[in-house]
Every structure is written in structure tokens, then in C-alpha cells.
Image (cartoon, rainbow, N blue to C red):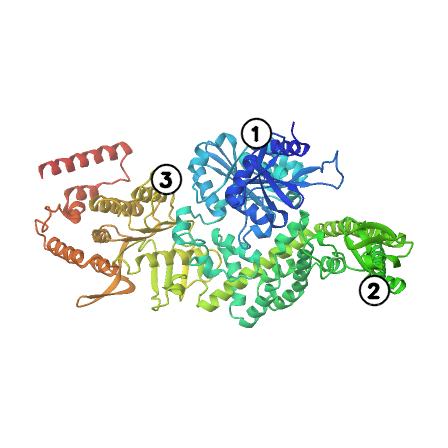
């Protein structure tokens, strides 16, 4: 036989087998069995045991209830679900307190502010894959953001993976049939860190549609834009069903669903996000050293989250971008106004998450006070922004959405005591004067306490027992204590309650009456305060849409203010955006490097990419000279312009690009069985398959992960493909150490050579960081190796070998004969080749496809015969 409490726990655990069950026992949350072993290991706490029968003890590990958030955070970060089994009600059943799971916490359903990053959304996503279609939905239950989309076509899964890389959900639901399987196996760990297998039937279109209809209270999904997108509906419906099981209260705030298309935004794959270090450095450091770290001058949590979304979703619509730029422009030259607004916005708490905590019924009294204080700042913000409304329509629209919600602020001021504790358990939450019933109870309790407080002095005077004391404990309540030497003075009406070694404790009928009044008043006050508090929260929850709209308007104002402040401080300029395919930047700078490397002045550089003139720039120059910085700064300037931000340059004219692709740096995926070179080739293949004539390609050292001749051949072919393919012809910056590639500018009309200028003074080499026309004739690799600290004997030997190679020696000293040069391998005299002359004579406009194929075959046979003869 086992204990009733053990049976209760086992039943709860049976219903939540995949979660760590935190079982409330008094002032602790306890865990048992395998859960206890896991918690002890993850949270570094002592593993004990508890008897459940005379012959059996089970492992047990507990944490204090007041500090449970920190332990929950450790469990969530370790990838575990947590089910909170709380005591419900105050009535016991057969001596056992009833308990129920009040919350199931997963990485994507966290509510506690202590467990969340203020300026990052915490998304729960759902993904369903079906042949060439993918449905994706995501929600942030702390802000109410709920969106869904569907991808179709041969590259549907790749586009969904790129969108997950943008969202970076804390948790992703996938059908059980996908685990283990291709869906989870192919998703990059950088996109999703925690997968939750969920019943496959939950994603089925009919079931998911009904779940959405029931939740939204509508008869059709046409108004939400996803009626004809069954997989988008499947993903969104799975999210709703999952939340109904884990965070039912969170559904109350999801009163809307938006369907979106990724075609509205610039596409950035995970490699590009990593290489450009948008929100995280390549070494994994967040914010510092990233573009977000430079741009984030926001002072509110909701503003910080919005800026993060703008950075991860650059726009393609020039009109929308110019509206953002107009808003930033209006603040750019107004330093005093920016300073005033910054101070005002600093007084705001997280209105967005506060509103949603109210809706979910988990808000504390002090959080309500913070909401009131924030709303009281809104009129001052409106007044400050009034000066801008005559200049820019975007500020007029924003001002209309800044609702001070005076009725909500007034309700909180009247209802919640200014000195209210953090939780209801502390009491003294409801302000005096708000409830006549509560005031009456409090008044009677206060009078009773005053009577008890004066009892000691009155009884000492009446009985002449100077040592008489009035005390209280939880077992006996209030009592009068008299020491043994004064027992003969005890009045007859005193009733003996407890005998101690040196004293006796007594009560009187009158003291008992006041004690009952006080204790009953405290219980009634606690219960009534809880009822009133819930009613106040419900009234505020009914206005949550107004509060959310204000929070989102504040977020936009905060982002505009931050971008204007950064632009003014760092001397950024407004970019000129258009739908053309040209790109010109005058004196561009890298936004991060110019701030982090202050030991020498940053050298700005120009860019001109006009496809009909120069579509591809082949950039040569030594290591450490600034090639990679230049490549990245161009990409970052374009990205900043397309998020609606001023850019680090003297002038910038940007033809909007649909995608930025980057292939920078060496990185292997050993766990996936991919070498550095394999990763390089996979990323390059992805670029060549998906780039368009509106894309910007940033390619650094293609082919360097293999042998010299292989590398040059691949790099040469890639440049030709980008230049010649009718679908591609993307604007491209191609940095390389292979000087042989500079010959491409003579063969391909839209290729231009540039190099990083170097000054030589005797044996000293100075990198000037300046990008100039022409190709480099040396790589200065040995000089860089010397700077890196290679042994002198290695440097000397390298210089000796290099000299022999440059002299064309048939043998390297101490080595084997070199092969032919790469230039001999790749180049031939095309100007005088007879095949080229015959190609020029062909009239392709009058030839049939079969005739063209036959003629091409004849030319190929001629080339092969020439090669055999040579």
C-alpha cells in the first residue's frame, strides 16, 4: 500500500509523463523518482528520499516556492518541460489537500519576466511539411503576436528554414511523424534549439481549422487571409491546441491572427545572418560587437523587441521605407526633443507584456502600479510629439494611437494601494476608500488590534502585576502571561490556558472575543481583497486592446527615436532608395568596426555597382588589409537602408535588393560530417541556385579550402556563372587571393578589378585600407605571417621558396618541381582562336534549335581535335 499523497502525485505524473512535475508541499515544490534525480543534477541541489511505505523510500528533491523561478529557468534552459502542481482551494478531502496542474511551462510558453529577455521576443512556433508545401506559424504569448504563412514550390522547405532562422523560436512544434525524420534532421540548430513532438492529427487541416474557428469565434477564416492555405492553418491550429493544454489563459489575448508572405521582406539565410553578425557575433556573443549593439539606443523593452524585428526583416517596399525614414528625419535634427523624449520613455515599463499578464491573470499589484505610472507618462509624450505632427503624416498616425487610457490609470490609482506588496499574499493591496465593505472590516479589525495593544497596560494597572505580558502564537492565539511570583494576584475571570516552567498563560472571554474578531477580519480581508483584485484586473483586461495599441505606438516612437539618435551621434546620412538596380555609396563605413577599433581612424571607401557598367567587383589584396571589412560594410549599409535606418556614409543611393547572400569565413560542421570546404561549397551552391538579378552577393575567398588549381578553377567558374547566367547577373563583390582572377575583367565586360592599396617602404609594408581600381600583384602573405609571429626560420624559408617560384625556377629549393602556373591552366588566347571567329559569324536569330545544336557539336569536335594535335 502507498500513501494517499503518493497516489495523488502518481496520477498527476501519469497525465504529464514528459514534464518535470513540481508538486507543492507547504513552502516547497517537491519532485520525486526520476524527476528528483534530474532536478538534483540540473539545479545542483541535494537529493534526499521520502518513505512511501514501510519498506520503500523514493528519491526526492525540493526547492523553496518563493525561489522557484530560478530553478524553473535552469530546467527550461536544459530543455525540459515543467508542470506546476499547486494546491487548489482550502478544503481537504479525507485529510488530503486537492492539487492540480495549474501551468505547464515549456521554452516557448514562459510568462515570468525573470525568465525572459526584455528586448527579445520569446516565440513558440509550429512547422508542418507536406511534399513541396510547408506551413509555419508562430506566437509570442507575452505580447499577443500571432502569425502564420505557407511556402510552396521546390524550395519551400529551404525558405521555411530561413524564416525559422529569422524567428529563432524558443520552441517548435512538429508532428510526431516528423521525429525522428527529415524535418527535424535538416533544420539547422541555429534556427531552433528545442523541438516538441506533437500529435500529428493536431496539424490536420480540418481539425486545425475548427480549433482556430472556435478560438477566434468566427465562421470563416477568410478575414484572416489563410482560408486557402491548409498548411498555414494546420500550423496555427496546432499552436492554439497546444496552448489550450499548457497555457489556457494565454489564449484570451490571441484575439487576432495575421497571415503574411515572406516575399514582402528581404530574405536573409542563416549563413548571412551569422556572417554579418546582425544580432550575435560569430563567436556567439550577443549584442556587443553586432549591428544590433550599435543601433539599439531604445529605452523601452517593447521598442527593443521591435528594433530586433525590423533588423531581421528588411523591407522591399520603397514607399514604406521612406515613411520610416521620414519619421527618423523629423527627429534627426532635433537634439533637445530627442533628449526630452528619451527621458519620458525611460519612465515606461513593458506595457505590452504587462497588458498580457493582466489578461492571463498572473499580474502582481506592483505591476499594476507600474502600468499606471507608464500610462500617466503618455500625455507628456503626446505633447512632446505634437511638434512633429505638422511635418510628417507618420507621426500624426502614431499620435492617434497613443491612448493614455485615463480610465485605466484612474481605476488603478483608486483601487491599488501605493505601498502594495509584490503579491496578493502580502495583504494591504486594495487602497482605503475603494471598497466600503473592505473598509468596514479593516476598521473593526483595526479597533480590535488597538484594544489588544492597550490591554497589557490596562491589566498591569488593574491587577498591579508589573510583569504581566500580552502575547500571541499560532497555536494558542492571544494570551496573558503571568510569572509564578505573582500568581496570587491573578483575577478570578482569568482562564488558565497553558502552564510553563516559570509562568502561566491565561485568556479572558473578552480577549477571546477580540481575537476571533481580528482573525476573522484578517481572513475576510484576504478573501475580499482577492475578489476585488480579480475584478479590477478583469476591468483592466477588457481594455487590453487599447493598452496594447498604446504599447505598440510607444515601441515605434522608441525605435524612430533610437535610429535618429544613432544617426546623429555617428554621422549617418539618409539613403536615397529606389527600385533601380544601381548602387552607389560615397565614403561608406563599417558601422561596428568604426566604433570598436579606435586605435586608428577608420578609412571610408566608395562603391559603384551599376550592372550595365560593372556588375561584379573582383577585389584583391593581402590579408588584414580590410577586404572582408569592406565587403561586410557594403552589405550592412544596404541592410540598414532597407530597415529604414540612416547609413554610415557621406552619400548612399541604394537600389532595393531582394536578398543578401554572404559566403565569408571558414566554418566546418563536423557533427554533420561536413568539412570546411564542404560547408563553403554548400553555401556557394545555395547562392547560385537562389540568387536573382536583384540580389547582392558578398563572396570572400571562394575555393580557398582546396588545392590551388581546384580553388582557382572553382572561383573562376563561379564568377563566369554569375556574370553570364540570364537569371542571375546579381550585383557581386568577390574578394580573392587568386590574382589570376583579375584576368576576368579582360574577358567579361561587366567585371571590374579593385584592390586594397598597400604602401611599401623598404622592408616595411603599410596597409592603407583604401579600395582603388586595378588588381593587386602581390598577396603579402609572408608579411602577414611574420606579423602573426611565425618563427623567423619559417619566414626566411618561405621567402626563399617564393623567390624561386617568382623566378620561374624548375625546382623549388629542397622541394619538387612545380606544376604549370594557374594562369597557364585557365587562360588561352581567345582573341585569335578560330572557334571564336566562327562563333561570331553565327546568326542565331535565323537558326533553329536543332541547327544550333548541330553547329555547337561541330565546334566542340574541332576544339577537341586542336587539343589532341597540341
The crowding category of the residue bearing disc 1, from other C-alpha atoms within 10 Å (few below 14, some 14 to 19, many at least 20), is some
Q: 474 and 342: which one is in front?
A: 474
* Res 479 → quadrant: bottom right
Give the image location of residue 303, x and y in percent: 56, 58
Q: Give whichever of discs 3 and 1 has the lower sequence position.
A: 1
Q: How far apart are marks 1 and 2 (CA)?
A: 79 Å
Query: Which residue is pictured at 67% across the width and 37% down the height?
Result: 100
Helix, strand or loop under label 2? loop
Give the image location of residue 95, x and y in percent: 74, 36
Q: 126 and 482: which one is in front?
A: 482
Q: Is residue 390 visible?
A: no
Give the image location of residue 192, x and y in percent: 47, 42
**Label 1 sits on residue:** 201
**Label 2 sits on residue:** 466
Query: Which residue is pictured at 58% across the width and 34% down the height?
Result: 58
Does 785 appear above or below 709?
Answer: below
Q: In which quarter of the image is the C terminus?
A: top left
* Res 622 → quadrant: bottom left
**Label 3 sits on residue:** 671
Q: Distance between the residues labelled 2 and 3?
A: 82 Å
Mark 2 against mark 3, which lies toward the viewer?
A: 2
Q: Mark 1 near mark 2, Cβ–Cβ under 8 Å?
A: no
Amino acid at each position: 500500500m502507498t500513501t494517499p499523497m503518493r497516489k495523488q502525485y502518481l496520477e498527476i505524473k501519469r497525465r504529464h509523463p514528459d514534464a518535470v512535475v513540481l508538486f507543492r508541499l507547504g513552502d516547497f515544490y517537491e519532485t520525486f523518482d526520476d524527476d528528483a534525480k534530474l532536478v538534483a543534477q540540473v539545479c545542483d541541489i541535494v537529493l534526499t528520499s521520502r518513505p512511501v511505505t514501510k519498506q520503500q523510500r523514493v528519491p526526492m528533491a525540493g526547492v523553496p516556492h518563493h525561489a522557484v523561478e530560478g530553478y524553473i529557468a535552469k530546467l527550461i534552459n536544459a530543455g525540459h518541460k515543467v508542470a506546476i502542481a499547486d494546491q487548489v482551494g482550502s478544503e481537504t478531502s479525507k485529510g488530503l489537500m486537492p492539487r492540480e496542474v495549474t501551468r505547464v511551462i515549456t521554452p516557448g510558453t514562459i510568462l515570468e519576466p525573470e525568465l525572459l529577455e526584455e528586448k527579445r521576443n520569446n516565440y513558440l512556433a509550429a512547422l508542418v511539411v507536406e511534399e513541396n508545401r510547408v506551413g509555419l506559424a508562430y506566437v509570442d504569448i507575452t505580447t499577443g503576436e500571432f502569425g502564420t504563412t505557407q511556402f510552396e514550390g521546390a524550395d519551400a522547405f529551404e525558405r521555411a528554414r530561413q524564416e525559422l532562422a529569422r524567428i529563432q523560436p524558443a520552441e517548435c512544434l512538429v508532428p510526431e511523424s516528423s521525429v525522428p525524420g527529415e524535418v527535424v534532421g535538416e533544420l539547422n540548430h541555429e534556427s531552433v534549439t528545442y523541438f516538441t513532438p506533437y500529435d500529428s492529427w493536431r496539424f490536420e487541416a480540418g481539425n486545425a481549422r475548427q480549433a482556430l474557428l472556435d478560438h477566434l469565434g468566427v465562421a470563416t477564416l477568410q478575414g484572416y487571409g489563410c482560408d486557402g492555405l491548409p498548411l498555414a492553418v494546420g500550423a496555427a491550429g496546432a499552436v492554439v491546441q497546444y496552448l489550450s493544454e499548457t497555457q489556457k489563459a494565454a489564449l484570451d489575448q490571441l484575439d487576432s491572427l495575421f497571415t503574411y508572405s515572406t516575399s514582402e521582406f528581404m530574405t536573409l539565410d542563416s549563413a548571412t545572418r551569422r556572417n554579418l553578425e546582425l544580432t550575435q557575433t560569430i563567436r556567439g556573443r550577443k549584442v556587443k560587437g553586432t549591428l544590433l549593439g550599435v543601433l539599439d539606443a531604445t529605452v523601452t523593452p517593447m521598442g527593443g523587441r521591435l528594433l530586433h524585428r525590423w533588423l531581421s526583416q528588411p523591407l522591399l517596399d520603397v514607399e514604406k521605407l521612406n515613411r520610416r525614414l521620414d519619421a527618423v528625419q523629423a527627429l534627426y535634427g532635433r537634439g533637445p526633443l530627442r533628449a526630452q523624449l528619451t527621458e519620458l520613455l525611460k519612465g515606461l515599463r513593458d506595457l505590452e507584456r504587462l497588458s498580457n499578464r493582466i489578461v492571463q491573470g498572473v499580474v502582481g499589484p506592483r505591476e499594476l502600479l507600474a502600468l499606471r505610472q507608464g500610462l500617466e507618462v503618455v500625455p507628456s509624450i503626446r505633447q512632446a510629439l505634437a511638434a512633429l505632427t505638422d511635418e510628417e503624416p507618420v507621426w500624426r498616425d502614431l499620435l492617434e494611437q497613443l491612448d493614455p487610457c485615463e480610465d485605466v490609470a484612474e481605476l488603478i490609482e483608486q483601487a491599488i494601494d501605493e505601498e502594495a506588496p509584490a503579491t496578493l499574499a502580502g495583504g494591504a493591496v486594495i487602497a482605503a476608500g475603494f471598497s466600503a465593505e473592505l473598509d468596514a472590516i479593516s476598521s473593526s479589525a483595526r479597533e480590535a488590534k488597538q484594544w489588544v495593544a492597550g490591554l497589557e497596560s490596562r491589566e498591569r494597572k488593574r491587577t498591579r502585576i508589573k510583569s504581566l505580558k500580552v502575547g500571541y502564537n499560532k497555536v494558542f492565539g492571544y494570551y496573558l502571561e503571568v510569572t509564578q511570583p505573582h500568581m496570587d494576584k491573578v483575577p478570578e475571570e482569568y482562564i488558565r490556558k497553558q502552564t510553563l516552567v516559570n509562568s502561566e498563560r491565561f485568556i479572558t472571554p473578552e480577549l477571546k472575543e477580540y481575537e476571533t474578531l481580528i482573525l476573522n477580519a484578517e481572513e475576510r480581508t484576504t478573501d475580499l481583497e482577492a475578489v476585488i483584485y480579480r475584478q479590477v484586473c478583469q476591468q483592466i483586461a477588457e481594455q487590453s486592446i487599447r493598452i496594447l495599441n498604446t504599447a505598440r505606438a510607444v515601441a515605434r516612437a522608441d525605435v524612430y527615436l533610437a535610429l535618429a539618435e544613432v544617426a546623429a551621434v555617428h554621422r549617418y546620412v539618409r539613403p536615397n532608395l529606389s527600385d533601380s538596380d544601381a548602387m552607389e555609396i560615397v565614403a561608406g563605413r563599417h558601422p561596428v568596426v568604426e566604433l570598436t577599433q579606435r586605435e586608428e581612424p577608420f578609412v571610408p571607401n566608395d562603391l559603384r555597382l551599376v550592372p550595365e557598367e560593372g556588375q561584379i567587383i573582383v577585389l584583391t589584396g593581402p590579408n588584414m588589409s580590410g577586404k572582408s571589412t569592406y565587403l561586410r560594410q557594403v552589405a550592412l549599409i544596404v541592410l540598414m537602408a532597407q530597415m529604414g535606418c540612416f547609413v554610415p556614409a557621406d552619400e548612399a543611393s541604394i537600389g532595393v535588393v531582394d536578398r543578401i547572400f554572404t559566403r565569408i569565413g571558414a566554418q566546418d560542421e563536423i557533427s554533420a560530417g561536413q568539412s570546411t570546404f564542404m560547408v563553403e561549397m554548400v553555401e556557394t551552391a545555395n547562392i547560385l541556385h537562389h540568387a536573382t538579378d536583384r540580389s547582392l552577393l558578398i563572396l570572400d575567398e571562394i575555393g580557398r579550402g582546396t588545392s590551388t588549381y581546384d580553388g582557382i578553377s572553382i572561383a573562376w567558374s563561379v564568377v563566369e556563372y554569375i556574370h553570364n547566367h540570364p537569371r542571375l547577373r546579381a550585383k557581386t563583390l568577390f574578394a580573392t587571393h587568386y590574382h589570376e582572377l583579375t584576368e576576368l575583367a579582360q574577358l567579361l565586360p561587366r567585371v571590374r578589378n579593385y584592390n586594397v592599396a598597400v604602401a611599401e617602404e623598404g622592408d616595411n609594408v603599410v596597409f592603407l585600407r583604401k579600395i582603388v581600381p586595378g588588381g593587386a600583384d602581390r598577396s603579402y602573405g609572408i608579411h602577414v605571417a611574420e606579423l602573426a609571429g611565425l618563427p623567423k626560420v619559417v619566414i626566411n624559408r618561405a621567402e626563399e621558396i617564393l623567390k624561386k617560384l617568382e623566378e620561374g625556377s624548375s625546382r623549388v629549393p629542397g622541394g619538387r618541381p612545380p606544376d604549370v602556373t594557374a594562369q597557364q591552366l585557365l587562360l588561352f588566347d581567345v582573341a585569335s582562336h578560330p572557334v571564336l571567329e566562327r562563333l561570331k559569324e553565327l546568326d542565331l536569330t535565323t537558326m533553329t534549335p536543332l541547327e544550333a545544336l548541330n553547329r555547337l557539336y561541330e565546334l566542340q569536335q574541332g576544339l577537341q581535335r586542336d587539343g589532341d594535335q597540341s
